[in-house]
Amino acid sequence: MSALSALRHGRAALAFIFVTAVLDIVAMGIIIPVLPGLIEDFVGSNAQAGIINGVFVALWAAMQFVCSPIIGSLSDQYGRRPVILISCAGLAADYVLMALAPDLWWLALGRIIAGITSSSFTTIYAYMADITEPEKRARAYGLIGAAFSGGFVLGPVLGGFLGEFGPRVPFWFAAGLSGVAFLYGMFILPESLPPEKRMRFSWARANPVGALILLKRHTELSGLAVVNFLLYFAHHVFSAVFVLYAAARYGWGPREVGLLLAMVGVLDMGVQGLLVGPVVKRFGDRATMVFGLFGGTVGIAAMGWAPSGLMFILAMLPNALWGLAMPTLQSLMTRHVGEDEQGQLQGANMSVASIAGVLSPLFFGWIYSISAGQGAPVPHPGLAFFIAAAVLLLAALIGWRVGRRAEREETAAV
């Protein structure tokens, strides 16, 4: 392959990853402002909808736990391209199913299928590891995070707008976007993993427990996996209760929620797309990760306290620093495995995140049900946010300790 051909190949790969990430997240973001409301229409109670929405998020995460290591290992053997394309097609079909869902059971089935097909995110991160040098991965993952954030800018705004025409309209639009991602990939996406670097599929590695064994090979990986778990556990407070919390406390509807989530996306896109690279270059991956976790702790605690919608919006500013943590955490972890294990590592990471995704929404949904509404046993609707802030603070402390120990070991080895 000539230098010019390789350059064009790399640009096409990056372009597809960015476009796919944006389209997939736009499709997911579109339904955020309307899904809890659709659930509330079925059950007839805001507090009860909090529990059901938490169950739905947990179902999605449970499928991620089971399927992410399988999909990651399949991509290690068969390549990234077919796995990503099949996932895009599956998402398109799933959104059609949810658009037609006549009751909660069909909606639950849709969330289960979405959890399976959304496991393509595992392969997207592995794809980036394939085409990026180790020392540049924090910035690369930051750019992917920015692409995701860009999707969240567009998605909730579109969802809030489309939701005004009916709660099912956003699902049809999401199906169309996922279909576009599939067709785009069919013509544009190059393969990133050459045959000589592939690893044979094995159920011993692909099952969730087997995938997690990879994280035990190094003390640093195990410690960083705990940070990963706590980060996702705290983050799911948004998917579990935010829409219902915003409606009950501030009177916000789908349009206001969509605009606020768009603001979150803009801030996160700026942090991950513009700040990660320079901050990592100046302070290193570990310090950047810990600083981001501390910033998120302050922001999410302020959200639980905010007595007005304006104060809640202002709390988004320190919370945006959270975007510094994920790409640097991913970068630190990829340094401890070989090229033929990147898919397995990302599958293991997603399994850890999925365990958090199963437990966290159920927990925060329950916390919201006992803290919101008249006669609540613990009368403070922001309680879930305070607990999430404490979890994030714990992640920051563990991340600092694990990273410091790793640096000492690297220095001693030299």
Image (cartoon, grey):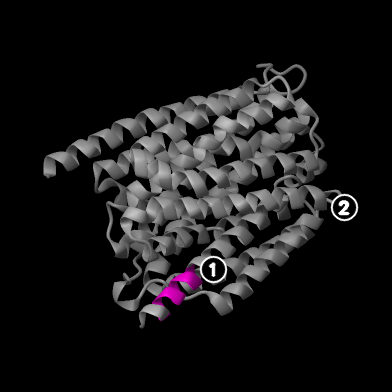
Which residue sits furthest bottom?
A: 1
Element on which disc 1 rests:
helix
Q: Is residue 6 magenta?
A: yes
Frontmost residue, 274 versus 247: 274
Q: Is residue 11 magenta?
A: yes
Question: Which SS class for mark 2?
Answer: loop
Which residue was labeled with disc 2? 165
What residue sits 72% from the left and 51% below the top?
A: 31
Answer left or right for 47 relative to 322. Answer: right
Relative height, residue 328 to residue 179 (above, below): above
Q: Which disc is residue 16 wearing?
A: 1
Question: Residue 92: x, y in percent?
Answer: 67, 66
Q: Quadrant of residue 387?
A: top right
Q: Residue at coordinates 33% horizontally, 72% vertically from top-left?
A: 198
Discs 2/1, front = 1
* Amino acid type indicated by mark 1: Phe
Magenta stretch, residue numbers: 5-13
Q: Residues within 10 Å of mark 1 (few under 14, many from 20)?
A: some
Which residue occupies the foreground of this view, 48 or 3? 3
Residue 286 place in picture, x, y as percent: 34, 38
Q: Is residue 114 visible?
A: yes
Specify the principal SS of the magenta part: helix
Identify the mark nearer the N-term, 2 or 1: 1
The total number of labels drawn is: 2
On screen, residue 395 above or below 172: above
